[in-house]
Image: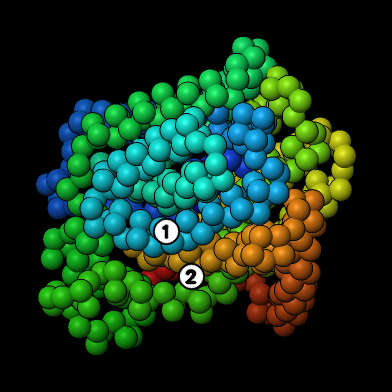
Amino acid sequence: MVADCTAGSGDGSEGEKEMDQKAPASDDIGGHGDRDVETVEGPAPSEGPPGEAAEPRKWKGAVIFLCFYGFMMAIKPGEPFITPYLLSPEKNLTRQQVTNEITPVLTYSYMVVLVPAFLLTDLLRYKPVLIIQGVSQVVIWVILLLGSSLLEMQFMELFYGITMACRLAYSSYIFSLVTPALYQRVAGYSRTAVLLGVFTSSVLGQLFISVGEVSFYTLSAISLGFVSFGLTLSLCLPWPKRSLFFNRTRNLEQVAAKSELDQMNPKESAVTPAASASGWRDSVFVHMLLEVRNVTRRPNLRLWSLWWVFNSTGYYLVLFYVHILWNTVHPVTENKNVYNGGVEAASTLLSALTSFIAGYVKIRWNVWSELVIGVITALQAGLLLLMGTTDNIWVCYTAYVLFRGFYQFLVPIATFQIASSLTKELCALVFGINTFLGTLLKTIINLIFSDKRGLGLDVHSQFLVYFVYFTILTVVYLVCAAVVIVRHYRNQREGGGDSEQVASTELSPVAAESEALSNGKSAKA
């Protein structure tokens, strides 16, 4: 889940096993190191009353504190080394147990908790969900320190799922501190803080292992200290007075609902009852649910939403199991020979770089989107085949770093293409639905191929399944690309393709009502 709709994330939340995560988000670290980066694109709260603008010193201090909190919560030096720890003599778990009985619990837990976390984040105004996340982090490392049985490690994965689902509260919280004019700037601050924390965490973990030669147990104890400090910081966070859907004045609710209906369906909005009527049926949230159906009628939004669902599913499955693959290719004999932290640090840097580069790519996305997605998906499929068949751990490391970089290149583009023509309310809901559908698909694939109650495949066989999965996606994207390109040039020859405009991608776009869609039309149209 990496990695907010105005933040342009996702990794992970990244989501984390990530962000987004996402995050997304996010946003991520890989494998166990990526669990907190996979994040739902969290909602950005609505504008407050005109007189509510915070004093500069007050909001700057609050934003700085929240970014510091995000940085500290991302520092878990032992996270990239959880899989080697579980497979070490200290825990004495088998590779089959970790692959087919422990890791699948993460996806199941995340799917069950995701929707309640999304709703409670808004209903409880962020802070309680961040505290729940902090408590879950502490429980994870306590279990890793004191537990050793299969059941205890499954509980550890359950709390990892809770942690991942709660990540969206951080990406949303920061927007309750500032006015809408500052949303894009503070989104960049919060995402940078998390990425810097992820990078610092990976480097620290690798230094502790390779230079300090500390044990996995000691590294887990150090991580427990960091997350305990992060929990303490969450208790000190201010409590926002408003949120997106449930905590807003009746007047604001009327304005937001009417504005969204006018944008999405001006003809129907003229006869739509005002959102001031009492009861949950007339809330902004319900109105947004009714408007989601219009998103599926827009080809560009439909394409990138489907990319978000299907490609993020494959991406996070790789992140969840890649550490097990590394241990299979290069079994751990000594702690100092494990380089998971260094690889995660390198992949985080490359992901940040490719995300940044994506912000400067200017092409006609309404024509070339399918082709770009298809080519990058094909490259990812080749990298998965390489990871699943090589016996060289350094080749496996390099393929993983490139795989993550390709995905993170498309994340800000997808975020822009989806968010640029939607209000923040609908944007948050669309990203939430996309993330839930992706999580549901991950759960189905896990249950069939990974879980011992299904086929219970070993990790090499799973990566071949992921290769086939990405290959099928590649074929679909390239066929669609051929259809779109042929149709475009045919229309151009007939004189119907000259009005298209070039739509550039931006990192962390904040869509204004008059912002142009990728086809050059106004969002109000």
Residue shown at 72%/65% (left/top)? 455
Q: Which residue is mark 2?
A: 521
* Residue 68 in picture, x, y percent from top left: 37, 28
Q: Is residue 309 above or below residue 210?
A: below
* Residue 57 in picture, x, y percent from top left: 21, 28
Residue shown at 23%/31% (left/top)? 236
Can residue 73 be seen here? The reply is: no
Q: Secondary structure at mark 1?
A: helix
Q: Secondary structure at mark 2?
A: loop
Q: Between tags 2 and 1, which lies in front? A: 1
* 354 or 446, nearer to the observer: 446
Q: Which residue is mark 1?
A: 114
* 69 or 275, nearer to the observer: 69
First in sequence: mark 2 vs mark 1: 1
Residue at the outermost top position:
212
Can residue 267 be seen here? The reply is: yes
Q: What type is the residue that disc 1 sits on?
A: Leu
Query: Could you give the CA–CA distance between mark 2 and mark 1, rounded to whole angstroms?
Result: 34 Å
Q: Is residue 325 above or below residue 331?
A: below
Q: What type is the residue that disc 2 sits on?
A: Lys
- Would you identify the image quadrant in which residue 333 lies? top right
Residue shown at 74%/37% (left/top)? 327
Q: Are marks 2 and 1 in contact (CB under 8 Å)?
A: no
